Image (tube, rainbow, N blue to C red):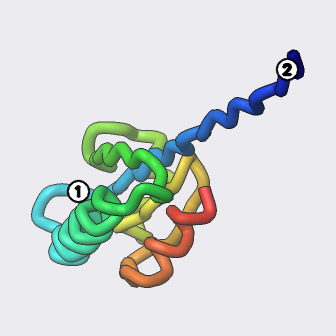
Amino acid sequence: MRRTRQRRYCCQVSTAIITLIGKPGCHLCDAARETITAVVQQLDSEASAPTVTVEELSILEDAALLDRYADEIPVVLINGRVHNIWRVDPARLRAALMEV
């Protein structure tokens, strides 16, 4: 009797953490939030897309963030690295998330 070895492949699901740094009442922050939400919703239906978690931080609640990003909000980080400041391009965000 001949035995065959079965290969087992396991898909590793990648993850991404998007951090939106802004402050209340910031219209650019509101626009960035809307763009991020739309992109994440689109990616939710794709099997090859990473699992995305979105968090928000306010420069008004963190002195270090205020010192670093006061003139640049909104700031979008992907896995702790700056992705962009001021405006979020949906195609660029989607491409960056697919590369995670």
Q: Residue at x 54, y 41 (%)?
A: 13
Question: Which quadrant is the N terminus positioned in?
Answer: top right
Q: Residue at x 43, y 83 (%)?
A: 91
Of all residues shown, which one is farthest toward the right? 2
Q: Position of residue 63 (x, y in %)?
A: 40, 40
Residue 23, picture quadrant: bottom left
Q: How many marks?
A: 2
- Disc 2 residue crowd, few under 14, some 14–19, many 20+, Cα 10 Å: few
In the picture shown, does residue 18 fall above or below 87? Answer: above
Relative side of 51 to 32, left or right: right
Q: Position of residue 60 (x, y in %)?
A: 26, 46
* Front tag of 1 and 2: 2
Cα separation, mark 1 vs mark 2, equals: 63 Å
What residue sits right under mark 1 in the picture? 23
Which disc, if any, is residue 10? none
In the picture shown, does residue 27 fall above or below 3? Answer: below
Question: Which quadrant is the C terminus positioned in?
Answer: bottom right
What residue sits right under mark 2 in the picture? 3
